[in-house]
Amino acid sequence: MDFRLDEGLEEFRQMVRSAIAEDLPNDIRDRQRRFGGLQSDPVDVLEWTRILARRGWTVPHWPVEHGGCGWTPLQLFVFQDEMIRSFAPDSCWGGTHMVGPVVYTFGSEEQKARFLPAIRNGDFYWAQGFSEPGNGSDLANLRTVAVRKGDVYVVNGQKIWTSSAWASDWGFFLVRTDPTVKPQRGISFLLIDMKSAGVTIRRIPQINGESDLCEVFLDNVEVPATNLVGEEGAGWTYAKFLLDHERTTSSFIYFNKKEVALAKAMAASHSLDGVTLDKHPRFQGRLARLEAEVSALEWSVLRTLGDEPFQYPEAAAASVLKVAGSRLQQAISELHVDLQGVQSIRLYPHEVHKRPARSPLWPEESEYVTQRALILRAATIYGGTLQIQKNIIAKVAFGL
Ligand SMILES: Cc1cc2nc3c(=O)[nH]c(=O)nc-3n(C[C@H](O)[C@H](O)[C@H](O)COP(=O)(O)OP(=O)(O)OC[C@H]3O[C@@H](n4cnc5c(N)ncnc54)[C@H](O)[C@@H]3O)c2cc1C
């Protein structure tokens, strides 16, 4: 297969690049750049979504009838590449890549009319309420219960590791509506207003100095029955659909490419024994290996987007990309830390927050290197752990 981008695609890239340059506010770009483009502030995310909405570009991957752009997979790939390259914030993944597709595929007409435009326009930030204490990988045995009482479900239970719940307006939750049947059959998919009475959110301090992950407690929360997506008891099917969607996009290829470029820039500006690190054979060897792996991953992603039929079921391909992409993220961030040597420890968040935002002694991009390496330990956990991905590959690709 020939993956070179043809002229039309290059033109498309230039068009996207200049649109982002025109639209992206400097302060948002600077914040995103300072944190290395890995995580975005929810406020910035929604503001950028509202700006992008003017061009109709907030959910380009959705079907056209729901507000998608009708772009080809390669155009979508180039669009994402340009967004990351330009330090634009991500979209609210929970809305655009998770609950949105579930709502337009399985939701009621009323839910489509209410939530799809809101997701497209950046009205709400969304949280994913799946994992519970003791039920992360073993999600099918989740214990949060929802009991139907007239027009409402009364929900009781606890979720954990809920990203950005503290900033979220809405959450999509997996709840048990029938404890008497096989675990997978008794789960339903509920949309819950995070401001509802009985919802308590507690932020969890993280080793990287942030506290974006949360515990969410649900005590007699009354949720209108009209917020049930699809059929009662079919939540597991919708969750699997959603998680496959999530994994297909988790190769982090755009991010990995940018991070390799950052490693090169850092190596060129750090010296050892009077020689810049990019001239040291040990660095060159590590970099060459990582660059080869990033190229291989990019080609694998393009192959799954191309016309060539894939040998294995899609779920296996998605898991392979997730395993490769998340491990690469970790390996590249570890190289960044090694490049900084002792400075990595000095740049630990508590130190960062005490000093002025700009320091002539340290390169701007390197500011969050240690924090990023720490949070990236989680890349092989969220969205299904490394071991769970390997189980999926063993099962669906090799029938083990
Ligand atoms: C940064 C971050 C963000 C997250 N965001 C969200 C979110 O927004 N919403 C949400 O719902 N959840 C979120 N999670 C939770 C995440 O989905 C779970 O942590 C993950 O599914 C693992 O579950 P667990 O933590 O209960 O670990 P466990 O399932 O207890 O796993 C512990 C260890 O045992 C291994 N293991 C478990 N079962 C098997 C098996 N069958 N075979 C082999 N090995 C196994 C695992 O691989 C892991 O190494 C987030 C997690 C992190 C770290």
Image (tube, helix red, strand yellow):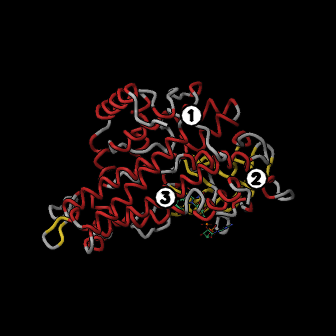
Q: Let me know if residue 279 appears in the view.
A: yes
Give me the residue at 56% from left, 25% from top: 64
What is the three-letter code of the residue carrying label 2?
Ile
Snapshot quadrant of residue 272: bottom left
Task: Kindly state the secondary structure of the residue where label 1 is placed.
Answer: loop
Q: Callout 3 environment at 10 Å: few (<14), some (14 to 19), or many (20+)?
A: many
Query: Residue furthest toward the front?
Result: 1
Q: CA distance from mark 1 to mark 2?
A: 36 Å
Q: CA distance from mark 1 to mark 3?
A: 25 Å
Task: Write down the residue under mark 1.
Answer: 307
9 up-or-down from 126: above or below: above
Given contact means CB atoms under 8 Å apart, are the residues at marks 2 and 3 in contact? no
What is the three-letter code of the residue carrying label 1?
Asp
Say whether mark 1 is within 8 Å of ligand 1: no
Q: Which mark is residue 187?
A: 2
Q: Callout 2 environment at 10 Å: few (<14), some (14 to 19), or many (20+)?
A: many
The C terminus appears in which quarter of the rendering?
bottom right
